[in-house]
Image (cartoon, grey):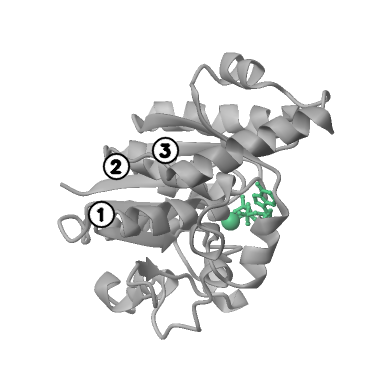
Amino acid sequence: MTRIITVASGKGGVGKTTVATNLAASMHDFGVRTLLMDTNLTTPNMGFHLGIPLHPKTIHDVLRGEARIHEAVFVHSTGLHVVPAGISISDLKSTDPSKLPRVVLDLVGDYDTIIMDGSAGLGKESLASIEAADDVLIVTNPNIPAVTDALKAIKIAEEFGTNVLGVVLNRVTGKKSELSVEDVESLLSYPVVAVIKENPLFHESLAAKTPLVYYAPSDPEALKIKKLAAEIAGISWEPPSYARKQGFFTRLLSLFK
Ligand SMILES: Nc1ncnc2c1ncn2[C@@H]1O[C@H](COP(=O)(O)OP(=O)(O)OP(=O)(O)O)[C@@H](O)[C@H]1O
Ligand SMILES: [Mg+2]
């Protein structure tokens, strides 16, 4: 049975595409038949995270009824299947997002997991990707505006009957001014399933058009996303011991800084 997971946030720029691409890449590496779909229809940029060249058919063509969903599947050099979005202005003007839940149904059975990268805001396209999903993974940052918008996304998921898997707390620096994990859990009433630190390697990996799990596979933040992917997929996996040690010594050193 295919499981559809949407990565949503409410607020823009919190790290949805970063989390979605790294999760999908990790699941693919675990042997899960995974499709990553760009459902950010107005400001899509998943293609940049993966270095996808302009693909002849996109999710926009499919939603306009000008292509079948299978024609829009691009096979990345890693073997990961991806449905990119069109990036032209005309694409964003002429597309009806409400068809998304029906379009995705055509893929059911072909994949174990479909990960949909949602858009910012809570307009029609965000709602469509939350409605189309079995599960929603919320990404937020440790500040009040991001968490307030995350709460709205959660309420919408609950109204659609979409299961909320939990919250990825991203771009954590450890500053006193930030909301703590406990704050976020109590405001959102869902568990924080991963805490991803602010890490310049995410910028480097974006510039290299390569998800962090491939760009720096032993980086602690990459391993956290991989661990989350394993947990979501129900796979038993632990980070390699050298990486755990590196994490321990890094933490120890930081105590003396
Ligand atoms: N943990 C992190 N540390 C440092 N930079 C990060 C981290 N997570 C994401 N970023 C950077 O933040 C920027 C926004 O990330 P991303 O595109 O994933 O957000 P988004 O929620 O998908 O945005 P949008 O709402 O516009 O779709 C990117 O430049 C990305 O590299
Ligand atoms: Mg995005």
Q: Is residue 214 left or right of residue 80?
A: right
Could you tell me the amino acid type at mark 2? Answer: Ala
- Residue sitting at 43 percent across and 51 percent down? 23
Q: Secondary structure at mark 2?
A: helix
Q: Position of residue 63 (x, y in %)?
A: 38, 67
Q: Gap between marks 1 and 2, in whole Å?
A: 8 Å
Which quadrant of the view contains residue 179? Answer: top right
Of badges 2 and 3, the one in the foreground is 2
Neighbours of disc 1 within 10 Å: few (<14), some (14-19), many (20+): some
In front here: 159 or 209? 209
On screen, 164 above or below 110?
A: above
Q: Secondary structure at mark 1?
A: loop
User: Dividing the image into 4 quarters, which one contains the C terminus?
Assistant: top right
Neighbours of disc 2 within 10 Å: few (<14), some (14-19), many (20+): some
Which residue is label 3 attached to? Answer: 136
- Residue sitting at 32 percent across and 59 percent down? 28
Res 216 visible: yes
Q: Gap between marks 2 and 3, in whole Å?
A: 14 Å
In front here: 43 or 51? 51
- Residue sitting at 61 percent across and 63 percent down? 43
* Pointer 1 or 3: first along the chain: 1
Q: Is residue 43 left or right of residue 38?
A: right
Res 132 visible: no
CB atoms at circles 1 and 2 under 8 Å apart? Answer: yes
Could you tell me the amino acid type at mark 1? Answer: Val
Which residue is label 2 attached to? Answer: 233
Q: Position of residue 212 (x, y in %)?
A: 55, 59
Quarter of the displayed picture in which ligand 2 can be seen: bottom right
- How many labels sit on residues? 3
Neighbours of disc 3 within 10 Å: few (<14), some (14-19), many (20+): many
Which residue is label 1 attached to? Answer: 32
Q: Position of residue 97 (x, y in %)?
A: 44, 57
